Image: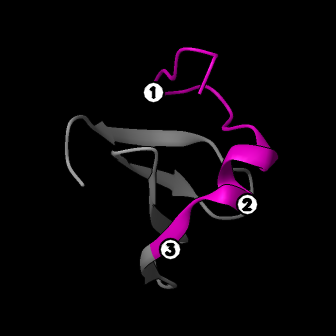
Amino acid sequence: MAKKLQVGERLDPDIYDHGKVIYRDRERDLVTISVEGRVIRVLENTLEIVEILKGMR
């Protein structure tokens, strides 16, 4: 991930595509993915980053 990730920003679709979905909450429209050693929670429809859990694998 060359670009620094920040809450409120949109996750690049290429990064999303390379990640592994580890949890999907359809009621809240949230997807939690693991990518390059990080766990990132995004809104599924917009890919807006809502939480970044650093250092988790």
Q: Which residue is label 2 attached to?
A: 17
Q: Position of residue 43 (x, y in %)?
A: 58, 56
Give, as a single range, the part of the protein colored magenta: 1-21
SS for dot 3:
strand
* Residue name at image x 61 percent, y 25 percent: 9
Q: Label the magenta part by its dominant secondary structure.
A: loop
In this view, the mark in front (3 or 1): 3
From the viewer's perspective, is residue 13 above or below residue 29? above
| Callouts 2 and 1 close, C-beta under 8 Å | no
* Residue name at image x 75 percent, y 38 percent: 12
- Quick check: is 4 in the magenta stretch? yes
Measure the alpha-carbon separation of dots 3 and 2: 9 Å
Q: Which residue is label 1 attached to?
A: 7
Q: Position of residue 7 (x, y in %)?
A: 45, 27
* Residue name at image x 51 percent, y 23 percent: 5
In this view, the mark in front (2 or 1): 2
- Quick check: is 6 in the magenta stretch? yes
* Residue name at image x 52 percent, y 39 percent: 49
Q: Where is residue 55 in the image (x, y as percent from the top left)?
A: 20, 37
- For the residue pair 21 and 43, the one nearer the viewer reads as 21
Report the amino acid beneath label 3. Val
Measure the alpha-carbon separation of dots 3 and 1: 18 Å
SS for dot 2:
helix
Report the amino acid beneath label 1. Val
Q: Is residue 4 left or right of residue 44?
A: left
Q: Looking at this rendering, what residue extends furthest in the right direction?
A: 14
- For the residue pair 24 and 21, the one nearer the viewer reads as 21
Measure the alpha-carbon separation of dots 2 and 1: 19 Å
Report the amino acid beneath label 2. Asp
Q: Which residue is label 3 attached to?
A: 21
